[in-house]
Amino acid sequence: MASIPYGHYVAGEAQSVTTQTLQPVLVLLSYGLSQAEKGFNAIPGSAVLLRYIRESHRDDPGRTLLEILLALFALWTVVQGRRRAEREAKNFVKLSEQEVDDLVDDWMPEPLVPPLSSAAFSTLSKTPIIVGPAGPRPRVTNSLIDPNLALSPTNPVVDPALLLTAKTKEVINLASFNFTTPPSSAGTTNSPKNSTDPLPGTETAIATLRKYGLGSCGPPGFYGTIDVHLALEKAISSFLGTESAIIYSQSFATASSVIPAFCKRGDIIVADRGVNFVIQKGMQLSRSTIRWYDHNSLRASNSTSTLAAVLEQLEKDLKRKKAPLTRKFIVTEGLFADTGSLTDLPVLLSIAKKYKYRIILDESFSIGTLGRTGRGLTELFNVPATEVDMIIGSMGHTMGSAGGFCTGSTVMCEHQRINSTSFVFSAALPALLATAANETIDNFIRYPEMFTALQENIRAVRAVLGVVDSLEILSHSISPIVHLAIKQRSPPSLAPTELPSLSKGSNATSILTRDPPSFDVAREEALLQDVVDEALMQGVLITRAKRLYGDNDEKQPLGQEWHAIRPTIRLAITSALSKKECEKAATVVKNAWIKVIAKRR
């Protein structure tokens, strides 16, 4: 038997003693880990998480190390934050309750809005207030009609009690977006002057209010959608001839939800420089690459700022940079709200198909006013609505309700139900407004003579106003929105007329044109407001087209507006008035224009 060296015996004995000493600790640790594993496995979903960790570590061990480091960093940040807060708390000055109360009493908060100037109070005082029911011939009042309603720094708000006894004046309403009105119970296309009949759709709205209540109490995607919403979506798609439709509770949120739902960072949007403020905000929220073409300039041979030229240049740039495939959209309006211009839809569609762009068309003012039955631009140009990828619009302009809609293919509408911010997060449209819009669509189909009367009134107004030398009508000849601008004087020149040549055009990356027309915004708006006030005193209610300019005296576009828009007076022609009433109202506006502007130029 071989002998064991003494040194080896001592080392083995020491190891045995160490093992016996640590054995209870190891048993306790093993038991703790076993209990922790049982507790973790008892948690619902733990097996899925464990399988994910194992597969993640197997596929990418470096990711496991990175996640461990991030977890340790998060733990370190929390501990350090607490220690830092404890150290800083030691340096705080402790105040007594009396000292805290004294500081609160001495604190003067900054005003939420800057104080109004005397000119602002004067403008607010002249703002017409409708007393009683609204309509084509409402009764209005303001400080011009009743001086007791004048506002001042000591009297900044109109006392509602004064409206009960204030002087009022019946006016012809050419300011409200009440473009069409169905025949009254008396059987006339135009509402009788002193009719006591309820407005069309009133009884239906009241019945809906009593059945469903006022609010929807939830977003459409959860529990805010009811049968009247689905009926309205079906009515819109059936009326326009599309596959499907989706409605929104706010007209302003429609474009700012639809555009970002499809256009993301890296996508390309080519837009008209004349699109309205709502579309501008929608494109801004999308964070897409935006290119601009000159207002309503689709295909011209002597400019590089047309839609066709901008798309051609974009295609060359993408090929040169070998850019990846991305989504591409053309965003424009059917009937432009700021100018009253009309888009040539067939030309737009041909260009979009040539360069493979999708179209987002805003028909807020064209649906319900244009076409034989009010179906908008597609009916006017005899183009199927299915040719347009997305048609968006407001139900608050031409449908006598509120909210907005988007119509097109079923896939496009279903995509918005889970990706559109307004549809997911905003409360659904109140039921009575949905039935009111549905009633209006039924009236479009039932009374197509409204649109014939509307066009006759438009022609009557333009015939009276078109003879004024100092007045320029910017709108299209069939547009129910008539924008009146001060005609710019062109200095006489003896230079020969130059032949049109290919111009360099505007920068497509900027909404500003290369050589924008210059006009004194503050002075022109003041003159136009005088025309509005003079017309009101003569019995016609009109308004200036309001803009969101900056607060400085020169009214430069500092914040909200992306570019300066020409000051105009905006007329909203309606079929609720007779042709003679429209001619009378246009004559009043013409006389007021001549009195204020023609004599001051």
Image: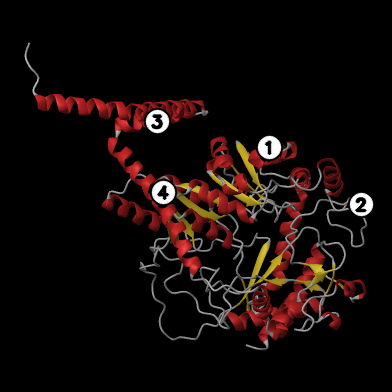
Viewer-nearest of labels 4 and 1? 4
Q: How many marks?
A: 4
According to the picture, the residue beneath numbered tag 3 turns out to be: 52
Looking at the picture, which amino acid does disc 2 mark?
Ala
Q: CA distance from mark 3 to mark 2?
A: 74 Å
Disc 2 and disc 1: Cα gap in Å? 31 Å
- Residue with the most extreme top position: 1
Q: Is residue 65 left or right of residue 338?
A: left
Q: Is residue 356 visible?
A: yes
**Residue 186 has which mark?**
2
**Nearer to us: label 3 or label 2:** 3
Q: Earlier in the sequence, mark 4 or mark 2?
A: 4
Of mark 3 and mark 1, the one earlier in the sequence is 3
| Residue 310, above or below 32 | below
Residue 315: x and y in percent read 34, 51
Q: Which amino acid, by three-letter code, is at mark 3?
A: Tyr
Element marked by disc 2: loop
Left or right: where does residue 92 sit relative to residue 11?
A: right
Residue drawn 28% across the image and 35% down it = 61
Nearer-the-camera pick, 256 or 495:
256
- The image's mark for residue 234 is 1
Q: Which residue is mark 4?
A: 75
x%, y% of residue 6? 10, 25
Q: Earlier in the sequence, mark 3 or mark 2?
A: 3
Q: CA distance from mark 4 to mark 1?
A: 54 Å
